[in-house]
Amino acid sequence: MPALVNYSGDDDFYVGGSFYTNSRDLGRLCSISSQVDVYCPPRKRARITAPFLFGETEFEQNKQPSINILPDECLFEIFKRLSGGKERSSCACVSKHWLMLLTGIRKSEYESSKVVKENIGSVSDDVEMISSDEGDGYLTRSLEGKKATDMRLAAVAVGTSGHGGLGKLSIRGSTSSCGVTNFGLSAIARGCPSLKVLSLWNVPRVGEEGLSEIAKECHLLEKLDLCQCPSITNKGLTAIAENCPNLTALSIESCPKIGNEGLQAIGKLCPKLQSISIKDCPLVGDNGVSSLFSSASSILSKVKLQGLNITDFSLAVIGHYGKSVTNLMLGSLRNVSERGFWVMGNAKGLQKLVSLMITSCWGVTDVSLEAMGKGCPNLKQMSLRRCCFVSDDGLVAFAKFAGSLEGLQLEECNKVTQSGIIGVLSNCGLKSLALVKCMGIKDISLEAPLSSPCSSLKSLSVRNCTGFGTSSLAMVGKLCPQLQHVDLSGLYGITDAGLLPLLESSEAGLMKVNLSDCLNLTDEVVLALARLHGGTLELLNLDGCRRITDASLMAVADSCIFLSDLDVSRCAITDVGVSALSHAKQLNLQVLSFSGCSGVSNKSIPSLKRLGKTLLGLNLQHCNSISSRTVELLVESLWRCDILF
């Protein structure tokens, strides 16, 4: 090879001659560098050092030889001997042909004994160094939409090879005719064997060939995320299982050609798998899911199964073999009956389960819910969404056995009533309770005396439960005296008279209060809130409370010394209230919203500038009395603050 490179005979090679005859040729060939992401150092103007014969025609002069007359095999051997990433990047800038040749060389095929560490600044600007491990760079790259092409991936593969290699790659939305194909992914595989994280979203032209090439070259792969990849099949997933033993996390969503065969290979050959998420894959059934758990070495801890055609058998396997599972999410499992959830709980295998979320599963009933409470003694977080067969009896029975339960969320569980909520609060040490769109909760007065107070509850969220009113608030106030966070957004039926007892019964001091869209509340509530909890209040949201006026802002300015986030959007606020806030001596607001307050005008600009000394965010959207020019001046003055207008 040295003889070939240094050839100085009388044929078409000249000693010391340039590859190209003039600077125009170089410029034409180097123009490709603007289209790819590889390092191209500044070049001096080309000089012609070859012998010049007077009297030759221009045509004869332009017959100067080019390195492109070498066959690809020779170029391939030359490129393999390049000493480092900087040299390879420079060659890749010459032409697309050279770039394609470079992407065909695996990193292990370069004959240099070690990778030459170049200046990090020589990497393309949009490749980011995010960490360093034992002197090796760890690069991450994200390509979206039109930027996701084979050419760009090839450039990334070449440009990052001399800087520790690519560690994380994300490709999203590559659906155009020029989008990523198997070729681009293969280039990454050959040039970036250090790849550990790969995410492919909506990449229809990548199939099993590209994924198999990743599996063949990137043995360090730890996380794989596949979403809307219709061309990837079980063969590609099997290749990952056979060649990537370090795989710890796998996510598959809307991949119609991936089924049981691929998951069986993963379960058998990936002993380090800790997290699995499978959603909307119609070919995935019991055989695939059960194989992930049945292995004796399974250490799966985070599991998400949604929209799959699995049956009671899969849940029985999870309940028996899921000894390492700590987080479990089950959703839209139409073929799982009450028996499946009952067996999962009674199998007693979910001893380490800490968080359980179940959504739109008809098999969750009072009987199966009680069984899950018995079988998961360490459960701390429970979420039930759109489980229409759960009633008060099942909820109370579950709470009795789930002694470690700290957080409970119920959404659209319409058979649960006020009685069931009281039963839960009386039977376990809940710290947070969230009720969303539970239409079965009606505002009725209970004749029986309330149980002992639930002193553990710190956070209460009741959103868009239209039946939750004055009596329910009074009940919560008496039963939960240690509340610190209260979210009552969307309860347009509550009034001052209903909310005041809750404010007065809170002993710990409220820190966060969200009353957005509580249409009937007035300044009386805010005045009481400022008087009783001004020393602890940090967040107050009054968005849409149209009866709140400047009087509330004056009370806040006088009493709420720790308030950092205030939202009075769509309230009856005027310049007077803004002025009162700006003259508060101890107030240090960081986020402030006046969106939709037509009473706030240009006159408030001096007040907003004073508030801006501490503000990080200011919302003035739909404030029609403030001109655009005024906002521009405000933006120039408050350069630290993000202003929405």
Image (tube, grey):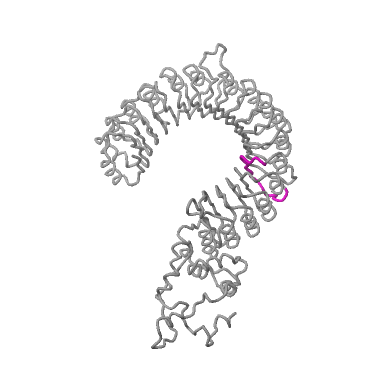
| Residues drawn in magenta | 268-283
Position of 388 relative to 242 (above/below): above
Q: Is residue 208 left or right of residue 536?
A: right
| Quadrant of the snapshot with the N terminus | bottom right
The foreground one among 482 and 434 is 434
Left or right: 531 in relation to 378: left
> Would residue 139 be found to the left or right of residue 521 on screen?
right
Above or below, 232 against 400 in this view is: below
Q: Is residue 271 above or below residue 10?
A: above
Expressed as whole percent of the image width and height from the top left, the position of residue 100 reads: 55, 65
Residue 82 rendering spot, x and y as whole percentages: 55, 72
Using the rendered view, name the quadrant where residue 379 is placed: top right
Q: Picture quarter containing residue 244?
A: bottom right
Q: At x 48% / y 50%, what residue is drawn? A: 145
- In the image, is residue 499 above or below residue 97? above
* Front position in the image: 467 or 189: 189
Residue 406, picture quadrant: top right
- Locate residue 253 relative to residue 592 in the image: left or right: right
Q: Residue at x 69, y 36 (%)?
A: 310
Q: How many marks?
A: 0
Verify whether residue 275 appears in magenta.
yes
Q: Residue at x 62, y 57 (%)?
A: 214
Quadrant of the image for the C terminus?
A: top left
